[in-house]
Image (cartoon, rainbow, N blue to C red):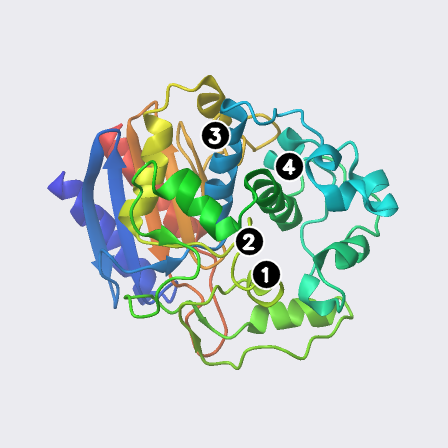
Amino acid sequence: MRHLQQRMEETARRYSQEGYFPSAVMTVFRQDGVLFQSTLGDARNDTLFDCASLTKIATATQVLLAIDEGHMTLDSALSGLLPPVRDDAFLRRRLERVTLIQLLTHSAGLPAWYPFYTGKEGFWPTLRAGLAQPPEEGVVYSDIGFILLGKVLEELHQKPLEQCLQDNLVAPYQLGNMTYLPDTSLDIMPSSYGNPIEENMVRDMGLSFDGWRPHTPITGQTNDGNAHYAFRDVSGHAGLFSDGRSLANLCRLYMNTVSPLMMSSMQEQAPGRGLGWQVGDMYPKGCGHTGFTGTSLYVSPNLNIGCVLLTNRLFYPTGEAKQTAPFRRDIHQLAASFLG
């Protein structure tokens, strides 16, 4: 075990020295608990990171739990779950055949992304502009789909999404330090210097927005533009903050589940996609998910091993950032080969 930890720490140091990220926490776990944690840079074991799209796994888990409790099914149509969709002629026509399983597998024909904060009339009217193009074909990784799943949870439970997270997931399963809108007195890793990447994306679309944060460290607010500017840091696709152990507890929920639905969620349901999860070469004999800020999950019930990687790859004053896929892949392979 000590040899594995040393190999992972050496790998993390090498990538950090090559400019992939300034700080990191690695949490390796099995079905019965955390095996070890390692830190690098300014991070500690209990440091909270902006999870970015790891939020989608928390959202998907709540949806699966609600299905297991009989509140809806994988085939439930969005138009029957969300009154704003049902009551708007355009949205009803565009989304009436979209089901939960399609949203969970990113196969609902939705665009990948749209900057909702550039609209002046709120989310639902702006969604019409975001859906103006014909439906996409096949699997398209879509933030919009998980924004809508967050809306489904709020409608189902009749409470804000941040309260849904605590009441439906964090508290009953004792996950630990996982939250939206974190207490800023806690140790929180800064994620980036403003939103330079997203500013360019909006400009490339020919849209404009005058509310950008300055290019100074972002701490305790989500990096994601839609989550922050349009949804006040709380959304189904992004906004979650967590430490490594709490995310490991979320993954261990899947390793220990007896629910056929949750077990099937880790298997391929559409090309490269489970129910919320991603499958493929990056996740040996398992599944996982990544986050834009440099975060990732890997869980393999078959090998009884998993790994949470939390980095702040965007936290460079120049605004330049490297993709951390090679680092993730190397760490996951190390975990699978040593402990599988």
Residue 32 higher or lower than 249, as above or below:
above
Residue 12 higher or lower than 101, as above or below:
below
Seen from the viewer's position, the closer of residues 307 and 217 is 217
Residue 107 higher or lower than 215, as above or below:
above
> Which residue in the structure is indicated by mark 4?
103
CB of mark 2 within 8 Å of CB of mark 1? yes
The local crowd at label 2, few if under 14, some if 14 to 19, many if 20 or more residues have their Cα within 10 Å, is: many
The local crowd at label 1, few if under 14, some if 14 to 19, many if 20 or more residues have their Cα within 10 Å, is: some
Query: Hey, what amino acid is under mark 2?
Result: Ser
Work out how far the residue at label 4 is from the one at label 2, CA to CA, in angstroms.
15 Å
Q: Earlier in the sequence, mark 1 or mark 3?
A: 3
Please report the residue visible at 50 percent of the width from the left and 23 percent of the height from the top. 68
Q: Earlier in the sequence, mark 4 or mark 2?
A: 4
CB of mark 1 within 8 Å of CB of mark 3? no
Asked if residue 158 lies left or right of residue 203, the reply is left
> Which residue in the structure is indicated by mark 2?
235
Please report the residue visible at 33 percent of the width from the left and 66 percent of the height from the top. 188
Q: Where does residue 173 sit, x and y in percent of width and height?
A: 33, 36
Work out how far the residue at label 1 is from the one at label 4, CA to CA, in angstroms.
19 Å
Q: Where does residue 127 sit, x and y in percent of width and height?
A: 75, 54
- Disc 1 is placed on an element classified as loop
Work out how far the residue at label 3 is from the one at label 2, CA to CA, in angstroms.
18 Å
Q: Where does residue 217 sit, x and y in percent of width and height?
A: 42, 77
> Which residue in the structure is indicated by mark 3?
65
Please report the residue visible at 69 percent of the width from the left and 31 percent of the height from the top. 99
> Which residue in the structure is indicated by mark 1?
231
Work out how far the residue at label 1 is from the one at label 3, CA to CA, in angstroms.
24 Å
